[in-house]
Image (cartoon, rainbow, N blue to C red):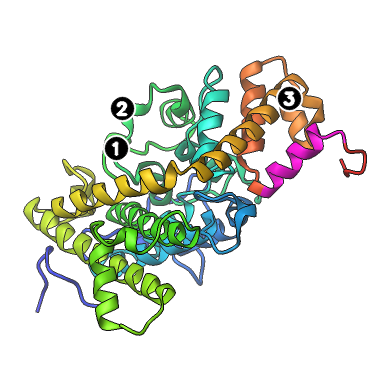
Amino acid sequence: MTNSPSAPFQPGERAPYAETPARSRGRLTPEPASRTRSAFARDRDRIIHATAFRRLKGKTQVFVAHEGDHYRTRLTHSLEVAQIARSIAHAMGLDQDLAETVALAHDLGHPPFGHAGEDELQVQMQDWGGFDHNVQTFRVVTKLEERYPAFDGLNLSWETVEGVVKHNGPVSHKLDEPSWQAIADYTRAGEGWDLRLDSFASLEAQAAAIADDIAYNNHDVDDGVQAGLFSLSDLGDVPLIGPELHGARRDWPDADDRMIRIEAVRRMIGVMVEDVLTESERRIAEDGVRSVEDVRRAKRTLVQFSDPMMADLGMLRAFLFERMYRHYRVNRSRSQARRILGEMFQLFMAEPEVLPPEWSVKAMTEDSRKRARAVCDYIAGMTDQYAIEEHRKLFSLDPSLDL
């Protein structure tokens, strides 16, 4: 029996609108195909071996690295996103390797100290082209990673680079923004590919994007409780997590709070994934999507939450914003983080000779825009702990410090 494009697919069955490695548009620098891996699996492995990926273990989401080793880092978050993205791709008959690859790559451009770090780099770079973590991810995979003698970056497949840039939707409207100049130059000046920036990315990339939303909403609930910013009882009336907490307590009345929290978060992930699958199948059928080209020409995101789920998520995020993201303890960490990065940026701009040799070579130029970009790239690549130690070495008068 043949499934219609909107029907659920059996394990191993590929949907007609799934990306296929054999039909990939290839790599910017041609390379022989791998005997052991598909093009997208090869991309995944290059990302895992990248320096920027390893550094994610020391970059945080909300809490600074020194605050505890149980909270999510960018690395553990990326792994959770990849697992959810693969599960969604598997259920929808998509290419699981491509979904996983985009998920693993999506945070490579994040600076230290989470969103506080990005906010500070945006301020410091406002006169020299701006900063955007998605564009920085693009620069990491196409330029900044230096692992191969034949090319800059990782020379990833067209579909992976497209997913990195467009996983949240078309971006052509952003090309006039200073922070997106790198992508505008890449696509307009013939430096790289035409990434069709006015179209949607593959369903695999969309699966990675929605998996990101699922992962961070769930682990922020988990981390917030562990940090003592709010309690399970505070969550009882909050949409999504509240019903799952009540259900977990009903099913496991003798379990302790830790186990109830873990069980409720696990269930909430399942509820959100099921909602995505149902809504995505509905949209694909309603829009008559039958090919990868139909996906790119679509008028809306196809892998998405339902409207009721979006409403519940809005209330959950409002709770997290009030009780977690703007908690005074988090605000103090954000304040410290921004001062650390801001002070280092200004020092490196004024005295590029104090940068490590491989970076001072790039920054020792009269072109202030190029100098600022080199300084920004250096800071953006730091882990939280490295940034703290580097700042201490630069600004402390303690003679015992190893400079």
Tell me the residue at 31%/54% (across/down): 210
Where is residue 129 shown, x and y percent of the image?
52, 22
State whether the magenta stretch is mostly helix, strand or loop: helix
Residue tagged 3: 347
In front of the other: 331 or 53: 331
Residue tagged 1: 170
Q: Determine whether 392 is above or below 21 in the image.
A: above
Task: Give the left or right position of residue 22, taking residue 6 as reference.
Answer: right
Contact, mark 1 vs mark 2 (Cβ under 8 Å): yes
How far is the residue under mark 2 from the one under mark 3?
Answer: 34 Å
Name the kind of residue labelled 3 in the image. Answer: Leu
Quarter of the image holding residue 247?
bottom left
Helix, strand or loop under label 1: loop
Tell me the residue at 46%/64% (across/down): 41
Residue range of the region highlighted in magenta in the rendering: 385-397
Q: In this view of the protein, can residue 98 be seen by the observer?
A: no
Name the kind of residue labelled 1 in the image. Answer: Pro
Crowd class of label 2 (few under 14; some 14 to 19; many from 20; radius 10 Å): few
How far is the residue under mark 1 from the one under mark 3?
Answer: 37 Å
Helix, strand or loop under label 2: helix
